[in-house]
Amino acid sequence: MTAAIIAYSLFGHTLRVAQELALQLGAPLSTIHAPDMKPGPLAMLRFGFAALTGQQTRVALLGPGAAGHDLTILAAPVWAGHVAVPMRSWLKQHPPLPGRIALVLTGGAAERPTGVFAEFARLSGALPCATLYVGQAMIAAGQDKAAVAALCDKLAVQSPLEA
Ligand SMILES: Cc1cc2nc3c(=O)[nH]c(=O)nc-3n(C[C@H](O)[C@H](O)[C@H](O)COP(=O)(O)O)c2cc1C
């Protein structure tokens, strides 16, 4: 069983979690690039509105993707109570993912966003075999590495060298 990680991150929190996952699992990490979603004046309002109203945006995957792996780990931030628009756009535009799915969300809130995980699962077209929520307070407190390690234990993934 080998895994690949596909992440979207605007400010770097989700990327930090995804990079830790890649390190702990020895898994390749690809990132979703959204050229029209750049931070700037009123960006939070625009992006929040885009998330609330189900808008799409242009996206491109940077990296090797998930082909040939048994498990795809998708990681994205929560925007306005929804999966961030670039991850949502990428999931809508790409063919079905191979194998099992695990989902990672990051957000500003402390509590796990159950409804956003349900939306994420629906968009990915599969029931996730594992999920992880990392709130910003966990990252600030340096608790994200342990949370990632707990997820990795559940996933039972081999590094590409062992597979
Ligand atoms: C447009 C926008 C809307 C957001 N809405 C929420 C929200 O509804 N709930 C929440 O917990 N965090 C929300 N956040 C905070 C982000 O989810 C959080 O900061 C996340 O960790 C950022 O990930 P990133 O650094 O990978 O972009 C929002 C952030 C942005 C930019």
Image (cartoon, rainbow, N blue to C red):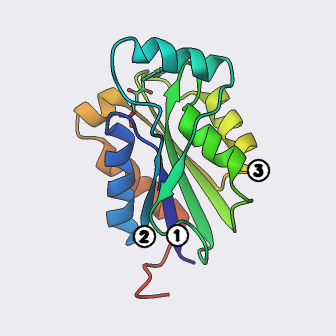
Residue holding disc 2: 27
- Compute the Cα span from label 1 to label 2: 6 Å
Quadrant of the rendered structure where residue 94 is? bottom right
Q: Which of marks 2 and 1 precedes in the sequence? A: 1
Q: Which mark is residue 63?
A: none
Q: Secondary structure at mark 2?
A: loop
Q: Amino acid at mark 3?
A: Gly
Q: Secondary structure at mark 1?
A: strand
Q: Is residue 63 above or below residue 142?
A: below
> What is the residue that sits farthest to the bottom in this orientation?
162
- The answer to whether 40 is drawn above or below residue 22 in the figure is above
Spatial CA distance of label 3 from label 2 is 22 Å
> In which quadrant of the rendered view does residue 55 lie?
top right
Horizontal and vertical percent for residue 23? Answer: 32, 65
Q: Nearer the viewer, residue 20 or 50?
A: 50
**With 100 as the anchor, is 4 left or right in this view?**
left
**Residue 77 percent location from the top left of the image:** 47, 34
Distance between mark 1 and mark 3 Cα atoms: 17 Å
Q: Are marks 1 and 2 in contact (CB under 8 Å)?
A: yes
Residue at image mark 1:
3
Residue at mark 3? 125
Task: Please provide percent x and percent y for residue 76.
Answer: 50, 40
Q: Which amino acid is tagged 1?
A: Ala
- Residue in the image at 68% along x and 18% along y: 53
Q: Does residue 24 appear to the left or right of 159 in the view shown?
A: left
Q: Nearer the viewer, residue 120 or 38?
A: 38
Question: Which residue corresponds to the image point at 54% horizontal and 57% vertical from the top-left?
Answer: 73
Labels 1 & 3 near each other (Cβ < 8 A) = no
Q: Is mark 1 within 8 Å of ligand 1?
A: no
